[in-house]
Amino acid sequence: MALARVSAMDDHHEWSESEPSNPEGSAGKSAELASDIESLKRAVRARDRVVAVVAHDLRNPLGIVLQTSSLLLRTLGDPNDRRMVQRIFDVATRAKNLVDDLLDVTSIEQGSFSIEKRRVDLSALVLSAVGAQHSLAARASLVLCLDLHPNIPEVEADERRIHEVLENLVANALKFTPPGGSITIGADARPDEARVWVKDTGAGIPEAELPWVFDRFSHARRLNRKGTGLGLGICKAIVEAHGGRIWLESAPGQGTTVFFALPASAPASSVDAKPLPPASVLLVDDSASNLDALEAMLEGSDFRVLRASSGREALALASRESVAVALVDIGMPNMDGIELAARLKALEGCGDVPILFITTDGGDAREIHRAYEAGGADYLVRPLEPNIVRRKVLVFVNLGRRRR
């Protein structure tokens, strides 16, 4: 991710700090300067009012374009027609996002920006935001990785706004990460707060530009891509409106990581909590040694392991057992892991089962796309790290238990 500061004015003036030789002339110049500054402020306010009115008026026609094109996409059968309508839908979506950003900036500057807080499961919110970006990541030949830690505290937050922050940060990372790279979205617990981060393997940001990345109208200039520079500024306003903080770490050639932290909610009362039965974890791989290795990784955890050496066997197990999480090898014969996932999701009671795909080839763009399209919750590339596998499984098990 490479970002650069854009000045509000094209001409830069340097004002002398030296002692004036003519006090009366200096006072006159100061008064003239103050008058010019006030005129400039009035012009900026007038501009912002016009932008706000125009942006607001654009929402209705853009909404009609989006609604109509969405309906056409559901009804058109000809691939060529669908491609043309998809282009209309995509362009209208980008235009709507730009309009929403302009309206947000206006409300921030006018002091009318507001949020509506309620208790939010941050882990589930992160998963929802990441899931919305899977198709974009697949098209860009990028892998989205999850690094959620167990026991992330809930937060008092405006769910829609924090979802907006996450989507904005992931979309920004997608834009500035070259094909074949990866983006990691993580969250963990810190004293009195929950921390979230989005890390990319892009080009990074020069140190001289780091102080300005959250400024309004700062924008990225990488691979001839252009942006409004509003996104990170809006993210900052949203996070700070929650009483949180946002910051960034980056270096050229080492990628960029954007962090934000929100105050943690007080733990929910667990007086009436009852012991829960062990969660069933389905392991699917045509290699017995791979199944042994996966089972060994889960030893010592409160899981009940179900093993299947084929897609047919896995479907039979899932039809009679309550599965909390499935770890599925993609490269199986007869019925590969992606086909199995689609069939598993169609089984009664299995539509919400998180599927963690396992592969030996993390750079196959077509495979990544198929995996995400099949509803994969995560995508693990061998060799596997036991601690990471255990942690990922535990996160999804805990989420399922909280939903129930």
Image: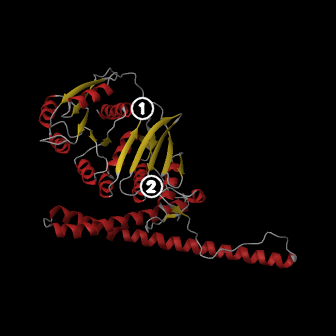
Q: Nearer the viewer, residue 254 or 136?
A: 254
- The structure's colour scheme is secondary structure
When the figure is inspected, residue 2 is found, relative to residue 398, above or below; the finding is below
Residue 95 image point, x, y percent: 37, 68
- Amino acid of disc 2: Gly
User: Who's the residue at 42% across and 30% down the image?
Assistant: 268
Residue 130 image point, x, y percent: 35, 48
When the figure is inspected, residue 195 is found, relative to residue 14, above or below; the finding is above
Q: Nearer the viewer, residue 26 or 85?
A: 85
Viewer can see residue 391: yes
**Is 131 displayed left or right of 328 in the figure?**
right
User: Who's the residue at 38% across and 71% down the image?
Assistant: 58
User: Who's the residue at 47% across and 66% down the image?
Assistant: 228
Q: Quadrant of the C terminus?
A: top left
Q: Which residue is mark 2?
A: 202
Q: In terms of sequence position, does the residue under pointer 2 or pointer 1 come before the other?
A: 1
How would you rate the neighbour count of disc 1 (Cα within 10 Å): few for under 14, some for 14-19, many for 20 or more?
some
**Is 161 displayed left or right of 274 in the figure?**
right
Q: Quadrant of residue 314?
A: top left
How would you rate the neighbour count of disc 2 (Cα within 10 Å): few for under 14, some for 14-19, many for 20 or more?
many
Q: Quadrant of residue 312?
A: top left
Residue 212 image point, x, y percent: 58, 59
Viewer can see residue 120: no
Q: Which residue is mark 1?
A: 151
Q: Nearer the viewer, residue 235 or 28?
A: 235
* Label 1: element kind: loop
Q: Quadrant of residue 137?
A: bottom left
Residue 99 image point, x, y percent: 41, 66
Q: Which mark is residue 4?
A: none
| Mark pair 2, 1: CA separation | 30 Å
